[in-house]
Amino acid sequence: NSMQMTEIDTPVAVLLDGEGNVLAEKNLQDGSLKLEKEQRNTNLSATFTGVNGTPASAKVRFTSKKQQSIAADDVTVTYGDTGKSVSASVTTPATGGGAISYAVKSGSEDYIDVNASTGALTIKKVGTATVVVTAAETSTYAQATKEVTVTINKAAAPAVTVPTPSAVTYDPAKTLADITLTDGWAWVTSTTVPTVGNSGYEAALTVDDANYDYTNVEGYDAQTHTVTRTVSLTVNKAA
């Protein structure tokens, strides 16, 4: 609702209908006065009480702006996707609608970022997020908003590469902990002394199963968030 009134130097206004009923009471310092019930396109009288208690009055006319409609589809993406965006447009009015802008709804910041002007998405993690699309107010139309759901699905798990440590010489004082594994792998039982003619030793890799689907990957354990494989290790005889 928009309002035109005679300027009066006072911080408080009480809006009355034709029968003297109070429709709204508002501090005018923020420049707004909200109607408590439907009284659009109607001439109303407002009484004002100044700082010194002197009453004054003015004629007020409230006019209702038309509503805009926004068209925007929900978006489904996969973790790791780039070049994805929310796309929206004003369908009512057909022309002359407010400028479109995009914002991440509070609570969704951990999942996505969105470009305020283009709607381009930056995917952060798997889950469900919400983008608020806003059509700006115009001289004829009120501001409008629409919420768009962005669903982020898990990506396929990357290939698991089992490490191949270099051969070692048997030493009863040396354990698997003395043999470094690459790319985040760790021996399951690092206190084991590797022996000649062994059949390999288990090692585990901690994986990002929150964002990647390891369900069908060999050796995957959802409880520990690891993939376990047998690592071949050549142990030569001591001299």
Image (cartoon, rainbow, N blue to C red):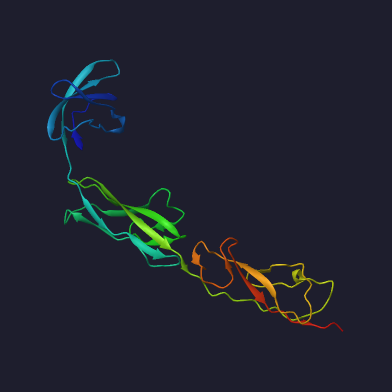
Q: For the N terminus, give its image quadrant.
A: top left
Q: Residue furthest right?
A: 239
Residue at (83%, 76%) from the top-left corner?
Answer: 171
Horizontal and vertical percent position of residue 73: 29, 59
Is residue 87 depicted above or below 192 in this figure? above
Which of the pair 108/154 is nearer the observer? 154
Residue at (25%, 24%) from the top-left corner?
Answer: 13
Residue at (64%, 68%) from the top-left corner?
Answer: 204
Horizontal and vertical percent position of residue 117: 33, 57
Horizontal and vertical percent position of residue 33: 25, 31
Seen in the image, is 80 located left or right of residue 222?
A: left
Seen in the image, is 83 located left or right of residue 94?
A: right
Horizontal and vertical percent position of residue 50: 27, 19
Query: How many numbered dots are placed on residues in this image?
Result: 0
Which of the pair 78/54 is nearer the observer? 78
Quadrant housing residue 193: bottom right
Is residue 17 depicted above or below 128 in this figure? above
Seen in the image, is 161 located left or right of residue 93?
A: right
Which of the pair 190/8 is nearer the observer? 190
Q: Residue furthest top?
A: 53
The answer, for residue 106, to whether it is visible in the render is: yes
Q: For the C terminus, give its image quadrant.
A: bottom right
